[in-house]
Image (tube, coloured by chain):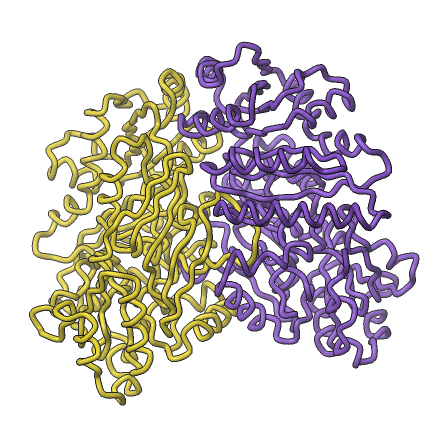
Chain colours: A yellow, B purple
Amino acid sequence: MKMPTALVDNERYKLMPFPTQDFTGLLGERYSEVASITEQYRPLEGHLYSQVPKAVAQPKSEDEVIAIHKICSAHLIPIVPFGSGSSVEGQAAAVAHGLTLDLRRMDKVIEINIEDMTATVEAGVTRLQLDRALNGTGLFFPVDPGADATIGGMAATRASGTNAVRYGTMRENTLAMSAVLASGEILDVGTTVRKASNGYDLVRLFVGSEGTLGTFTKLSVRLQARPETSAVAVIPFDSVAKAVAFAVAVLQCGLSVARIELFDERTIAALNKFVGMSLREVPTIFMELHGLIGTIDKQRGVITELAGVDEIEFGSTREEIDRLWGACHKRYYACRALRPGCDAFATDVCVPISRLTQVIEDTLADIRALPIPATLHGHIGDGNFHTVVLVDSKIESELKIFENYSSRLVKRAQAAGGTCSGEHGIGLAKKQYLAAEHGASLDWMRNIKRLFDPNNLMNPGKGISLD
Amino acid sequence: MKMPTALVDNERYKLMPFPTQDFTGLLGERYSEVASITEQYRPLEGHLYSQVPKAVAQPKSEDEVIAIHKICSAHLIPIVPFGSGSSVEGQAAAVAHGLTLDLRRMDKVIEINIEDMTATVEAGVTRLQLDRALNGTGLFFPVDPGADATIGGMAATRASGTNAVRYGTMRENTLAMSAVLASGEILDVGTTVRKASNGYDLVRLFVGSEGTLGTFTKLSVRLQARPETSAVAVIPFDSVAKAVAFAVAVLQCGLSVARIELFDERTIAALNKFVGMSLREVPTIFMELHGLIGTIDKQRGVITELAGVDEIEFGSTREEIDRLWGACHKRYYACRALRPGCDAFATDVCVPISRLTQVIEDTLADIRALPIPATLHGHIGDGNFHTVVLVDSKIESELKIFENYSSRLVKRAQAAGGTCSGEHGIGLAKKQYLAAEHGASLDWMRNIKRLFDPNNLMNPGKGISLD
């Protein structure tokens, strides 16, 4: 798989001298062009597009971000905002002549407002750090991608995770933000009020923009009340079709479902092996209910009835819940362990639920026929599912196998009215699929990109890009 | 209160001859410049900005909307998209030299997909029409502004209503749409998948754009599962502060609350008189819970405990619920009846919940001191509240009293970190407050307006406007 040439070869970025002294004067040792530092800024996972940046800056404040942007703007230097580097579609890939802007030193939890159920954080705060800060408040932040991503990065990729079926994604949970545009101008958009009809929704425009419109420095997010009690159910099914039909029924019954995840039999087998479980190796749903004590028990009967399955494992103690979801969260590593030494590439399509069974069945047939191992799991309450394909990236033909498979999968999802990306974003890997998905709207997205970033400095070549 | 002059006097719109024959050729009798028709296109409520358009077009199809836009674009004719005309901030006000585009003949429910829990409708379908179409599906469309607005109009104003605390506003519930830009270009944005991270969120950009970016022709919205059962509680409080504290506690407990509405004692008195109820005339919360049978009863005890009030009226039969909410829905007319022959102007601020008590108390003190009657009620789970002020619009000094009061209220809300509009939009009435609320972001909203509508033809002078 090749890097898009614009990212590494765009001559216009090289016309200007690199203003090393300006950066050093501003940031001292928090600016570096030394390989031992810059080498660390390859994306950490899914590193198809691994490159080393020209320079790395580690600002501590919004003012420094603004100053960095102004220097970059004056010298036509591409800026790659960088959080925890856990994005999987190449969003954090360095641009060879560019500056990677590491926001992890901007890690202050600025305010937690219990009554408003909001938190305001610097962009480099990670979700687990926010979790810890919320300890004892009775509130939690529901968006939970696999990695310990930064809140800024999560907003940039419009991330979600297992709780989205009940609590929404970063789209619904980002209330306000400060974003530094390419020019260094700072915009404060949105408010912490729960609703507003006060002009164009710039918050939602920035959420999911993948660093292409500006660098996020501060975000206010919505928190949720911790449920008085939770319960999990682990439900084996004969077939994917029955599992999806169950999920649809659950959604239509208005059960207080917080998560509903499907694992194919290979993922279950991988989990059994990796974490020492002994689940039946069939398509299996893990689901979690949130609610008041007493209201959960009532729902068990409904679940048993809807599932039509005898062997449901219910858990409602903290210990049981943690054990079961803990195992789920290890699924990525369990799948990796199926083929040690290889890369685990994740796909990420989302389709209307009415088409989910067919698309999953076709995809399972597809991965079963691959010469390399692959597993499937999904946030099926949202119609979003992933496959994890174990690729030996040293072997060009395996990369090609993955690329072809991934392309078939995306086209299958799009043909079903779905999208090439449910929650991972576009980055570099999905750019080729946007035209089919958006038609003329893509031109308008590019017009917006051009409006905010006329010199194409913000994360160029990724997402909605001009090249 | 004066019309902004740009709306009526902009000379550039008058430079071109009006292409009457083009329109007539396209639409026949569904195009008119006759006063008996055009006179009907004054906004129906809150008609501070009542004007008569030059012409009215009643397209039956998207193709006709496109053709109309092309004619208007060629002749620099302003376009005012018009649904049910129930917007209250002047959004549907006619432009004297402009064309009002009545979308009510585009009233087909195109598809209801039960499994996907989505509906796709033409823009002129009203919410009650959609309700009827959903009969027997087990699903409902949760966004419920007071009027029987069109779905297109509701998306345009980013409307909400009483259910937003649980189900969100048009922001969360609009999945996809077709919009005709000023030029006549049609954009299909969004998909019916439940989540996507596939580029800039043009759906959310168009939702709340109040006709200034394009005319919506078709929308896909999210439906919700009808709860197995519901219950209402009517809870009188000694003070607004106690009522708001109760609402905060309810949100933080994770009760399955669908609506939580506060009425001041004057609204209760008006309701008692208008619909013959006998509620105690104190600040009162009406709330509704949605859930499974058996899970609701459990919550009654929690509500009683949190409220600390003995005299809670619970209702859980369909009849009781309809009676209580039916009364609520008559509140606007009940308030109007406090001063027959006068206009009832509604305000619409939204503040962070932590500031809600203080802002409501200050506002109550303010309206108690007005020489004309006014009432207060709020969607307090969202921090959004309205006052209804009864104004004799024939008396200039009363209009002035309302204008000054409205300005004080907005500034009070903004000083508390809130917004000038929770759900009614900007239209003409709130434009003056945007600069204080958005700062530099307002310039960027205008840049976006200019990008999509360089000739300023789409609902000019309203919302995010260039004049």
Q: Is residue B248 left or right of residue A271?
A: right
Q: Is residue B10 left or right of residue B231?
A: right
Q: How far across and down, in percent of the image, does residue A99 sit?
A: 23, 73
**Towards the viewer: A218 or A211:** A218
A67 and B301: which one is in front?
A67
Which of the image's four quarters has the C terminus of chain B? Answer: bottom right
The percent coordinates of residue B75 (x first, y second) are 75, 78
Q: Is residue B242 above or below residue A283?
A: above
Q: Residue furthest bottom?
A: A15
Q: Is residue A427 above or below residue B14?
A: above
Instruction: State the residue at coordinates (62%, 44%).
Output: B348
* Residue drawn at point x = 70 percent, y = 24 percent: B327
Total numbered labels placed on residues in the image: 0
Please indicate, yes or no, whether residue A463 appears anywhere in the rendered image: no
Is A195 located above or below residue B311 in the figure?
Answer: below
* Residue at x 44% of width, y 69% of height: A435
For the view shown, which residue lies furthest in the top direction? B310
Q: Is residue A45 left or right of residue B301?
A: left
Quadrant of the rendered structure where residue A309 is? top left
Residue B385: x and y in percent read 59, 38
Q: Give coordinates of residue A48: x percent, y percent.
A: 20, 66
- Residue B186 sits in which quadrant? bottom right
Can the viewer see residue B105 in this picture?
yes
Residue A242 versus residue A427: which sits nearer the camera? A427
Q: Quadrant of the N terminus of chain B?
A: bottom right
